[in-house]
Amino acid sequence: MASFFRISLPKMTTSHDRAVLNQILNPLMPTSDSGVAEVHLEADKVDHPGYVLSSQLEKEAVLLAENMQVAEAIEKFAQAIQVCPQNPSAFNNRAQAYRLQNSPERALDDLNEALRLAGPKTKTACQAYVQRASIYRLQGDDANARADFASAAELGSSFAKMQLVALNPYAAMCNKMLAEVFEKVKTGKDE
């Protein structure tokens, strides 16, 4: 993960002040069209009689995955999808389990389906873009990774914003130089 400068500003600063400073320190990170507005993601809207049961099965699958029972979690996610094939979150979460199982192609299939089903400004879409971009990055496909990280960044993912900077060698160099300058100012060293 890329590291960024985090400057502690006095509480009396406004969100606009913080956004301006952030843009100065991280000029290559994407910003929303409005400049400083935060993105408010919508919940998935699924109109299907099996959605409630699907969500419950999905929660059980997440618990299994957290306990490293990945194969069982995948089976439970499959049940959730069978009960409600329009549930994008179940596809997104099963993709994560496939990633844990080192099955990136299956994960990509599920992420593509999650993105097809999810609304454009939903939490699931944001998470699916980040996951898909991470897989692309591991596969060496930086162009597709950059595109998906940009989509997730526009939806408010700070991780995606950091990854965009990490994918940009000029931004990484600029951040390193700024870090050195701030360290010199902080320690009083002048060259």
Image (spheres, rainbow, N blue to C red):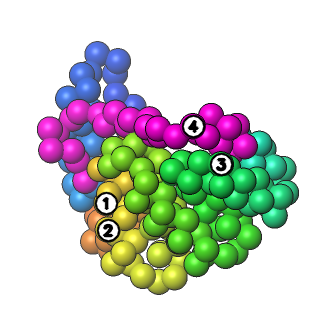
On the image, the x and y values in percent for residue 125 come to: 42, 51
The residue identified by callout 1 is 150
| Mark 1 and mark 2 residues within 8 Å of each other at the beta carbon | yes
Q: Is residue 114 above or below residue 101?
A: above
| Mark 3 and mark 2 residues within 8 Å of each other at the beta carbon | no
Q: Give, as a three-letter code, the residue at label 1.
A: Ala
Mark nearer the N terminus (1 vs 3): 3
On the image, the x and y values in percent for residue 165 come to: 35, 63
The residue depicted at 75 percent of the width and 48 percent of the height is: 61
Horizontally, residue 159 falls left or right of residue 66, namely: left
Which stretch appears magenta?
30-58
Mark nearer the N terminus (4 vs 2): 4
**Which residue is nearer to you in this view: 5 or 184?**
5
Q: Residues within 10 Å of mark 2 (few under 14, many from 20)?
A: some
The residue identified by callout 4 is 49
The residue identified by callout 2 is 147
